[in-house]
Amino acid sequence: MKTLLKLFLLLAAVVYWGYTFIHSPKVENDVVCSKVELSYADSVTDGFIDKAEVEKMLKKENLHPVGKKLDSIQGKAIVACLLKSKYIKTASCYKTPQGVVNIEITQRKPILRVMPNEGEDYYIDAEGTQLSTSDYLAYVVVASGYISKQFSKEKLPDLAMFLEADTFWKSQISQIYVDKSGKVDLYGRVGEDQVIHFGSTDSIDKKFKHLRAFYDVLPEAGWNTYSDITIAYDNQVVATRRKAESK
């Protein structure tokens, strides 16, 4: 009796695995990639890199997956290829059983345009990485003056990130100027001849907090009452009134 039961179970198992083999979907090595889907890991969807650029990079390295069997597509090689671009910060790649290769990237976002006295202008991102201005037009604050590449990488990103993140100051400040000693002046969108002497790039939050407090208590005459505003010193704002125009 036990022998018959064992034979019955064995026969059932054979039938089950046979049915599974016949009716199961194609295994990966039989599936061919039909398309590439590109997505962005953050909100920067309009920048240096689009799907056409991604596909161009992959074709150049003979890594474009469309038309290739899934088991021959090397996700790590695709990621390594994409990360060669200085415009891509992170990249990931995965395949689906339906033959779609999904690529997700994070782009480097320009936060400041640097126009030094010497050399060509360029953008920088939050990490100070230099990005070409010939590939993309970004409406960001401009920094000019005596700016070395080291200064732009080490000193300017934090200031630019603050302006980018703060809606009020982003609408107020249009230009950063760096003098020979590395001191920073800011120029506003309102009152082009008004200078805000910022000093070093230290204590950014505190300096703008003092400047905002000063701005909030301005007399009815308004922001343009002053030609120079200095926030370079600790815990104080020094403002110079404009000279009255001679009649």
Image (cartoon, grey):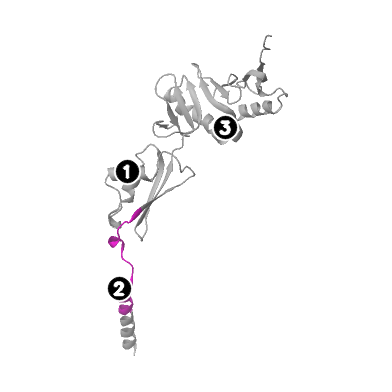
Q: Horizontal and vertical percent for residue 214?
A: 68, 25
Q: Residue 166 in magenta?
A: no
Q: Horizontal and vertical percent for residue 19?
A: 32, 76
Q: CA distance from mark 1 to mark 2?
A: 40 Å
**Image quadrant in which the C terminus is located:** top right
Report which residue position mark 1 lands on: 56
Q: Which mark is residue 22?
A: 2
Report which residue position mark 3 lands on: 170
- Residue at 67% across / 27% down in the picture? 215
Residue nearer the viewer, 112 or 221: 221
Q: In this picture, which residue range is highlighted in magenta?
A: 13-35
**Left or right: residue 53 compared with residue 110:** left
| Residue, far right | 220
Q: Amino acid at mark 1?
A: Lys
Q: Give the mark nearer the N terminus: 1 vs 2.
A: 2
| Residue, far bottom | 1
**Image quadrant in which the N terminus is located:** bottom left
Mark 3, other Cα within 10 Å: few <14 / some 14–19 / many ≥20: some
Q: Amino acid at mark 2?
A: Ile
Viewer-nearest of discs 2 and 3:
3
Q: CA distance from mark 2 to mark 3?
A: 63 Å
Viewer-nearest of discs 1 and 2:
1
